Amino acid sequence: MQKADQLRAEIATISEMLKTGRADRALKRAVKAGKKWPKMPAFPQMAGLACIHQGDFKQAQTHLERAWKMEPENPDLIQNFGLSLVQGGDAGKALTLMNKVAAKAPLTPPQRYVRAMALLQGRQLSEALVDVDEVLRHQNGNLQAHCLKADILDEMHQWDQAIDVLLAVAEKHPKFHYGQLRLAKGLVGLGRMSEALTHGRAAFALAPEDPETLEFVATLPNLSAEDRAELQAQTSKLLEAGNANREAAATVHFACQSALNNDPPSASKFDPPWS
């Protein structure tokens, strides 16, 4: 096999690993391939994406910065590097990166999305809202951007407007799991517990193995006996599986036990986030 064919095959193999959720294997293979082809930005880029999948944002930054320096005009690399900075808590560095890019050419909608996230972290809320609205002007179907707008509105204490955004998303896209969960949490903050339960149930039905969803729904005070039974059954299933979610499932287990014992969480659990 020629070197060019070997290179294409290696990139295809690692890409397939990332698509099928084998981030640990993809990372090892990408790092090894990066040593064999040190001038190819694809390998540190894929190593960075594998780290993002694993939640290791600091390590992702190292790989993605290396790839970006090799190919500084690549819009996907700019987006991914910026995202790793924001998710790693380095909002200032992300803003510096995006503003440097914006000085040369208009940001793409995905890049504006990353900058809006960084601006939100940095509490530059008006600027963040401008950016996310610009993203939605070009990509109104970007559901994560709608949720980000709701987050910004929450921080601006425009809670009813944030709920309106989330309600519109849930109505148009009822199978969007994160939208249902985010809406349920926002409704709890406003004390609209009946609606919160409705959307919490919807989120649970869409992703019954998601520990965050399980834990949230288990803490709702207005669960039915059937809700509690379903939560307990799903939690037991996760605990018995002994998979990567075991620790998270253990946390859910105790929340479900409280629900089953009719021991609702303290009122402070449901205090509005702005109190």
Image (cartoon, helix red, strand yellow):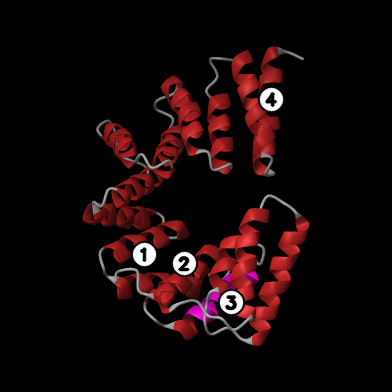
Asked if one can make out residue 168 in the rendered structure from this viewpoint, the answer is no
x%, y% of residue 108?
Answer: 37, 42
x%, y% of residue 43?
Answer: 58, 25
The span shown in magenta is 196-206
x%, y% of residue 54?
Answer: 58, 41
Three-letter residue code for mark 3: Arg
Q: Which residue, given by chain and number where applicable, does mark 4 sit on?
A: 10
Q: Along the line of sight, which residue is nearer the eye, 132 or 266?
A: 266
Q: Secondary structure at mark 4?
A: helix
Query: Which of labels 1 and 3 is toward the front?
Result: 3
Q: Along the line of sight, which residue is nearer the eye, 7 or 91?
A: 91
| Label located before the other in sequence (2 or 4) | 4
Q: Which residue, given by chain and number where applicable, does mark 1 sit on?
A: 150
Q: Along the line of sight, which residue is nearer the eye, 205 or 57?
A: 57
Q: Are marks 2 and 1 in contact (CB under 8 Å)?
A: yes
Three-letter residue code for mark 1: Ala
Query: Which of labels 2 and 4 is toward the front?
Result: 2
| Label located before the other in sequence (2 or 1) | 1
Q: Which residue, given by chain and number where applicable, does mark 3 sit on?
A: 201
Characterize the magenta stretch by its predominant secondary structure: helix
Does the magenta portion include 200?
yes
- Label 3 to label 2: alpha-carbon separation: 12 Å
Please give the name of the residue rendered at 36% of the width and 39% of the height, measured from the top-left corner: 90
- Residue 121 circle label: none
Q: Which residue, given by chain and number where applicable, does mark 2 sit on?
A: 182
Three-letter residue code for mark 4: Glu
Please give the name of the residue rendered at 77% of the width and 15% of the height, measured from the top-left corner: 1
